[in-house]
Image: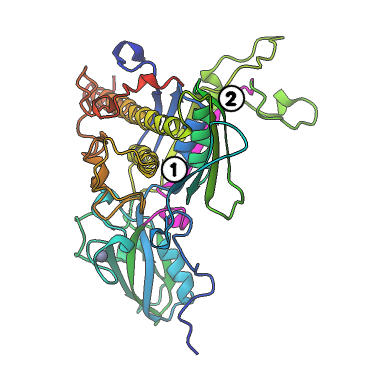
Amino acid sequence: MEYDTMMMDGESLGPSVKISAADDAYVNFQLSNVDLSFANSLRRVMLAEVPTVAIDLVEVEINTSVLADEFVAHRLGLIPLDSREIDQLNYTRDCDCDQSCGKCTVVLTLHAKCTGDDVMKVYARDLIVGIDRPNNHIGNPVITDPDGLGSLICKLRKGQEIKLSCIAKKGIAKEHAKWSPTSAVGFEYDPHNKLHHLDLWYEADAAEEWPASKNANFEEPPAEGEPFDYDAVPSKFYFEVESAGNIEPDNIIHEGIKEIQKKLAGLIHGLGENDGMDAGYDGPRSPDGMDGGAGWQDQGFTTPYGNTGGTTAWGGGGAATAYGTTPYGNSGSGGGW
Amino acid sequence: MSNNKHFNEPDDPFELFLVNEGDGEKKITEKPFAGTSNTSDFILLKEDHTLGNLLAEHLKQEPRVLMAGYKVGHPNVPEVLIRLQTDGTISPREILIDVCKQLIASYGQLGREFTREYELRRMVAAGEQENGGR
Ligand SMILES: [Zn+2]
């Protein structure tokens, strides 16, 4: 189906998005009207700085499986855990508690023993999630396969047993990749290589040996004998955001945006500018303070993400959450980039 | 034999992204650069190309900026230096704040634009289901 996006678009001068494919696991979209640095920063922040929960500490009581304790611990860390509404969970380092508590951690326990003659497979669904947590989904192992098993943790033969308890914490992929919300972020621009940012190696014929990507259909191929445009810059970017299962793909994008905005807000604050920012916000101490980030978001920096996807005011001028209404006064289009 | 600390456990797991305020570290520091007029260096601690490239590129697009550039001096050192020269009608600090605000607004707009497109798509998908996939 085709839409005339510009007709309904009140913000035709700024970033523009066109979604080409999406489901529960991924979203593919085209981002245009922005420059390379803007698009690339979004990509980088989605990969490395969107917080999720993952198992971080494992206490092994019994392990008579063939796998070493640290091997099992590593596998447990990599299991995607439900990280929706992550704002409700504190970073342990910011929490008021001594070591860990229900506000900053989720406890998962596992106990399995093989008594039959067949090999027993232990899956993520066998993890028992503790009840002391901010809501009843955070920290649940992500299970998407039709049999409802989840990730395979280990296999046991007759008589072998595994008994352990895990502490899952909030973190970001800059510390360890297990906290990444994405399994991959595809990123492409200029599929016909008109800008010559790539120098394609070839045996005989580059056009023959480098098949066009599927994004090439969205752009005009260079005309025969077209002169090189020295002033051209990329302005259309093809994203493929694939979720690891812990956060929905659209929320990865929203959370990524939020993280960049927080970083930038932290710089404004650090440079001593205080408009729009209350004194209560005491600096960019950690990517998400123990007050769940409410410190700055509620004062001037009203982003549309406070209430997840609730108010989608695209019906008209009702974009109440726009930055136009913040003390920043920029209507968004005044950026001049 | 005690083995409290594992050999591959980092000394400070947050050293890449947490500013150590207890040790007097500040997220951003301005150092006026004596070599040229209206020039300042900004040192951003615990940041990388994500902010460095974004800010340098967008500063360059400002008409009042004569020169802007950034470097991450060493890949293992999480620090960014941004050098910024203006034409004198505005201070480097002020224009940096301006650009930060513009970027926050632009990313906000991107978020709204994305939500709008995503909801639209969902409604169309639901509509098609109602019509028996026709
Ligand atoms: Zn706690």
Q: Position of residue B11 (x, y in %)?
A: 49, 69
Q: Position of residue A59 (x, y in %)?
A: 36, 76
Q: Which residue is located at x 57 percent, y 21 percent?
A: A233
Find disc 1 in the rendering and name its residue. Answer: A45
Disc 2 chain ID: A
**In the displayed structure, does residue A89 sit left or right of residue B68?**
left
Q: Which residue is located at x 38 percent, y 69 percent?
A: A57
| Mark linked to residue A245 | none
**In the displayed structure, does residue A95 sit left or right of residue A75?**
left
Residue A114, picture quadrant = bottom left
Instruction: Say above or below: B94 vs A161.
Output: above
Q: Is residue A189 magenta?
A: yes
Extreme residue toward the right, this view: A204
Q: Position of residue B91 (x, y in %)?
A: 46, 30
Q: Of callouts 2 and 1, which one flags the residue occurring earlier in the amino acid sequence?
A: 1
| Mark linked to residue A191 | 2
Instruction: Name the kind of residue labelled 1 in the image.
Output: Val
Magenta-drawn segment? A171-194
Q: Nearer the viewer, residue A88 or A114?
A: A88
Q: Which residue is located at x 20 percent, y 57 percent?
A: A134
